């Protein structure tokens, strides 16, 4: 957190209260990059210097979000929550805003490790697993049905054979 002003603290508190994010702590840029590289965190939110000053003056500051986008579904949901938090938090703290449709800052997202947001990397392997599991269930069901259909015919044939003697 480069700018520890009241608006930045309110935004971090809203993130903590949302139960969508787990705040690890305040780190510098090098530590943030290291945490992202080692997959210890999924997001790093950076408040630029002068964030509070720009909000008060009415200039939309840029809020940088660096995301580990290896799972685009989780990344997309979290970015949506970050936008809505900005609307909710700053509508209460800034009396000039009357429930805006967009937050009073620009949310700039840097997606790492999957910048295009391709979901096929996650969906296709999962889909293959589901197809294989369903095939095994279907084959087991067919084998059990076939065996069950054969059993009664064997017992009827044995009964008929005994009666004829």
Image (spheres, rainbow, N blue to C red):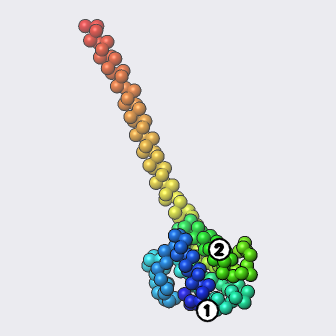
Q: Which of the pair 30/116 is nearer the observer?
A: 30
Residue at 48% from the left image edge and 87% from the top image edge: 27
Q: Is 48 placed left or right of 155 in the picture?
A: right
Q: Residue furthest top?
A: 165
Label whose residue precedes the other's in the sequence (2 or 1): 1
Name the residue tied to disc 2: 88
Q: Quadrant of residue 116?
A: bottom right
Residue 140 visible? The answer is yes
Quarter of the image with the N terminus is: bottom right
Residue at 58% from the left image edge and 67% from the top image edge: 77
Residue 83 visible? The answer is no
Q: How many marks?
A: 2
Residue at 44% from the left image edge and 49% from the top image edge: 133
Q: Nearer the viewer, mark 2 or mark 1?
A: 2
Q: Which of the pair 13/165 is nearer the observer?
A: 13
Quarter of the image with the C terminus is: top left
| Residue 95, position as x, y percentages in the image | 71, 81
Name the residue tied to disc 1: 49
């Amino acid at each position: 957190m480069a700018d520890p002003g009241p608006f930045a603290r309110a935004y971090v508190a809203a993130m903590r209260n949302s139960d969508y994010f787990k705040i690890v702590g305040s780190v510098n840029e090098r530590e943030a990059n290291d945490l992202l590289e080692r997959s210890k965190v999924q997001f790093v939110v950076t408040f630029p210097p002068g964030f509070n000053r720009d909000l008060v003056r009415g200039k939309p500051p840029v809020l940088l979000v660096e995301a580990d986008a290896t799972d685009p579904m989780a990344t997309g949901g979290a970015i949506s929550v970050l936008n809505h938090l900005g609307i909710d938090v700053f509508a209460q703290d800034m009396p000039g805003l009357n429930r805006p449709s967009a937050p009073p800052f620009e949310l700039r997202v840097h997606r790492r490790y999957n910048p295009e947001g391709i979901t096929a990397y996650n969906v296709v392997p999962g889909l293959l697993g589901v197809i294989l599991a369903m095939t095994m269930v279907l084959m087991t069901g067919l084998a059990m049905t076939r065996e069950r259909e054969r059993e009664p015919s064997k017992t009827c044939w044995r009964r008929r054979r005994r009666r004829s003697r």
